[in-house]
Amino acid sequence: MGSYAGYIVQTVVTLLAVCALAFVVLYGARRLGIGRPRGPIELVGLLPLDARRAIYLVKVAGRVIVVGASEAGFTKLGDLSASEMPPEEAIETAGFSDVLARVLGRDKGGSVRANGGSANGGAANGEVANGGSTNGGSTNGGSTNGGAASDGDATTRRGDEDGA
């Protein structure tokens, strides 16, 4: 083996060893609970204002403290009792695969949507999918006159004038 090939092999082996060591250390730290919150403190909310500024709601022993964070440090903006906090609304977040599928113009089943085809059903241009109906509402991803519906949505985005 030439000197360059030996150098490349040595570099790759060293890189793999460092990556394996990092994985073992991080996995072990996670199993031991290092870095997890402990005690009567909880982050209730976060509002990022820009890249370096944010507002945090921190719950400490029955009180919620409003804290501003910036490059200058932390500043207490106010506080209130935990009972005064409005109930938290459940926010459904889209996973990476859902966002990627939407960007690529595909539905969850993997088929490409064409001309307003349905989401979650693979039907397009008036075809029926998953019990959906044409010329009237749709159910569980069926398409109405080329319109789209998803997961039990009984309305269509376009084409209602033909079915109503």
Image: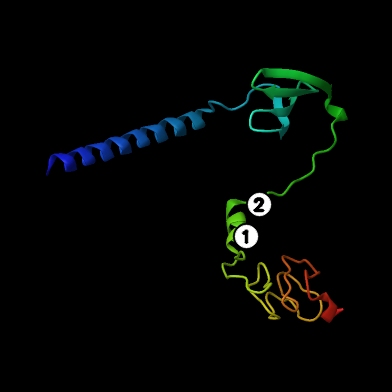
Left or right for 111, reference 59: left
Query: Horizontal and vertical percent for residue 20?
Result: 36, 36
Circle nearer the N terminus (2, 1): 2
Label 1: state its secondary structure.
Answer: helix
Query: Horizontal and vertical percent for residue 28?
Result: 45, 31
Tell me the quarter of the image containing the C terminus.
Answer: bottom right
Disc marking residue 102: 1
Whole-number angstrom distance, CA of label 2 to CA of label 1? 10 Å
Scheme of image coloration: rainbow
Q: Are marks 2 and 1 in contact (CB under 8 Å)?
A: yes
Residue drawn at (78%, 70%) of the image: 156
What is the tally of numbered marks visible in this picture? 2
Left or right for 6, reference 133: left
Location of residue 111 by image quarter? bottom right
At label 1, which amino acid type do we have? Arg
* Label 1 packing within 10 angstroms: few (<14), some (14-19), many (20+): some
Tell me the quarter of the image containing the N terminus.
Answer: top left
Above or below residue 25? Residue 3 is below
Location of residue 65 by image quarter? top right
* Label 2 packing within 10 angstroms: few (<14), some (14-19), many (20+): few
Label 2: state its secondary structure.
Answer: loop
Question: Nearest the camera: 154 or 71?
Answer: 71
Question: What residue is disc 2 on?
Answer: 94
Residue drawn at (37%, 36%) of the image: 19
Query: Horizontal and vertical percent for residue 162?
Result: 83, 81
Which of label 2 and label 1 is nearer to you?
1
Question: Nearest the camera: 161 or 64?
Answer: 161
At label 2, which amino acid type do we have? Ala
Query: Horizontal and vertical percent for residue 51?
Result: 64, 32
Location of residue 120 by image quarter? bottom right
Residue drawn at (69%, 23%) of the image: 69
Left or right for 15, reference 106: left
